Amino acid sequence: MDVYGLIGNPVGHSLSPPMHEAAYQKREMSARYVTFEPPADAARKAIESAQTLGVRGLNVTIPFKQAVLGAVDPTPLAARIGAVNTVDFSTTPPTGHNTDAVGAIRALTHHGVNVAGDAVVVGAGGAGRAIAFGLADEGVSVTVANRTVERAEGLAADLNDSTATESARAASLDALPDLLPKADILVNATSVGMGENISPVPSSALHSGLAVLDAVYTPLSTRLLQDAAEAGATTIDGAWMLLYQGVEAFEFWTDVDAPVTAMNDALRKRLSDSKRED
């Protein structure tokens, strides 16, 4: 039996196990997905131990996404983002991928969004970095809006140093009313709206020509997405990005086409069950 899994601390909240287990069942694979919760300072030891035990692949979540960089051979994209969320042990040393970037792009294209033009990414943290690099690599002009402008400026500089577009810019959150009327894509890569009825974006700046992806998935229908729907925008909840980063990981590990519908059904059932438990 092949073993895949997740390292993080904590990992009890993870939605990855039901999603991947559904994929193994659908593809009739002899495989299991398990979780590991090593101490926060044991990233390298965790990767080495998993390799010794014959684990085929690992997802990586907080606080280990940066710490595992030294224990794997990161892909060029993962190295530019500065974080790894998927480890493939079929190579020596193990290969470190970042599937968050592709997850966001595939979530957008699944909803018929033309990934081109101008995008505004709200947030310059880990998710914001991955999504901004993914968009820039598609040729999109990216503006990073962040509460701390200096952090947005750092990300914009990194994008311009390592992508072909060299058109990334930084802005404050106060600039959103001026930025969004000209934007084609808006991504909320912050935690604003998680579990509370608030939005990081003024509703008056939203418009029908916008595609809005909110990386938050609890709740699925955030205040931002509700406001965007009222404005006639295309809306994409955060579970789609979570789904497609998992799809990418499954396909890296197994070289098998992922059963996207089965994985999506399992993910959304778990989210629904969690909401009822709350």
Image (cartoon, helix red, strand yellow):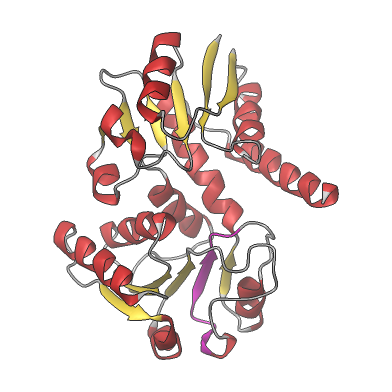
User: Residue at the location (28% across, 62% down)?
Assistant: 136
Residue 255 visible in the current orientation: no
* Residue 51 x/y as whole percent: 39, 15
Relative vertical location of residue 51 with respect to residue 84 in this rendering, above or below:
above
Tell whether position 7 is magenta. no
Which image quarter: residue 29?
Answer: top right
* Residue 271 x/y as whole percent: 72, 47
Number of marks in picture: 0
Relative vertical location of residue 33 with respect to residue 153 in this rendering, above or below:
above
The N terminus is located in which quarter?
Answer: top right
Residue 11 is left or right of residue 48, and the answer is right
Residue nearer the viewer, 66 or 250? 66
* Residue 91 x/y as whole percent: 29, 19
Relative vertical location of residue 114 with respect to residue 15 in this rendering, above or below:
below
User: Residue at the location (63% across, 40% down)?
Assistant: 15
User: Residue at the location (22% across, 42% down)?
Assistant: 76
User: Residue at the location (82% across, 51% down)?
Assistant: 278
Residue 71 is left or right of residue 212, and the answer is left
Residue 100 is left or right of residue 192, and the answer is left
* Residue 188 x/y as whole percent: 50, 67
Residue, far right: 276
Relative vertical location of residue 269 with respect to residue 169 in this rendering, above or below:
above
Residue 218 visible in the current orientation: yes
Magenta residues?
205-216
